[in-house]
Amino acid sequence: MYYPDCPKDVIYRYQDTIYRIAFTYCRNSSDAQDIAQEVFVRYLEKPPKLKSEEHLKAWLIRVTINAAKSLLTSSWLKKVVPLSDHEPISTDDSSSMDTYHAVMSLSEKYRSVIMLYYFEGYSVGEIAQILGRTETAVQTQLGRARAMLKTKLKEDWGND
């Protein structure tokens, strides 16, 4: 049985990861913060019994994805008018901004595999397990997402 550090350490260690994943789904900072808070409240109220640190991280990610999907399908969200489609990130590197905008323009199923693979460092097998998809589906989605990003970035760079 794995016993994690104190809850405060777990929150500090994973807050950025959870926020990024939530933001990937809902595309706005306020909802992403709400989802992250909900995930950590769930963790604090009833900590899961897990085997390792990796299981804890996977549990947090799965809860985040479920909370985001729940928000996106809620009737409340259908009545809300967003102030912006997504929050800008601050960077001086225009290619980073182009890449960010290209990733955020992808549909949820492609955004999620890109974020988990490139930003969180998960393997295809781990992503398949986290998202409840087959490894073949994840590989296909990664390939399609890469092709879409390549096309999108060529268009953006070609317009300069």
Image (spheres, rainbow, N blue to C red):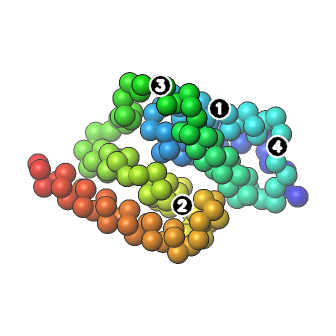
Left or right relative to 58: residue 69: left
Which residue does the numbered mark 3 point to in the structure image?
80
Residue 14 percent across, percent down from the top left:
63, 44
> Taking the image as drawn, is residue 29 in sight?
yes
Q: Identify the residue at image location x=82%, y=34%.
A: 45
Q: Identify the residue at image location x=52%, y=75%.
A: 136
Instruction: Identify the element where label 3 is drawn.
Output: loop
Classify mark 2: residues with Cα within 10 Å, few (<14), some (14-19) or many (20+): few
The mark found on residue 47 in the picture is 4
Residue 133 percent across, percent down from the top left:
59, 65
Pick whichever of labels 3 and 1 is earlier in the sequence. 1
Cα distance between the residues tagged 4 and 1: 15 Å
Q: Amino acid at mark 4?
A: Pro
Pick whichever of labels 4 and 2 is earlier in the sequence. 4
Q: Quadrant of residue 32?
A: top right
Residue 124 percent across, percent down from the top left:
55, 69
Cα distance between the residues tagged 4 and 3: 32 Å
Cα distance between the residues tagged 3 and 2: 34 Å
Q: Identify the residue at image location x=44%, y=66%.
A: 142
Cα distance between the residues tagged 3 and 1: 20 Å
The mark found on residue 88 in the picture is none
Give the label, 3 or 1, closer to the camera.
3
Which residue does the numbered mark 2 point to in the structure image?
121
Instruction: Identify the element where label 4 is drawn.
Output: loop
Which residue does the numbered mark 1 point to in the structure image?
37
Classify mark 4: residues with Cα within 10 Å, few (<14), some (14-19) or many (20+): some
Q: Amino acid at mark 3?
A: Val
Give the label, 4 or 2, closer to the camera.
4
Give the label, 2 or 1, closer to the camera.
1
Pick whichever of labels 2 and 1 is earlier in the sequence. 1
Pick whichever of labels 3 and 2 is earlier in the sequence. 3
Q: Amino acid at mark 2?
A: Gly
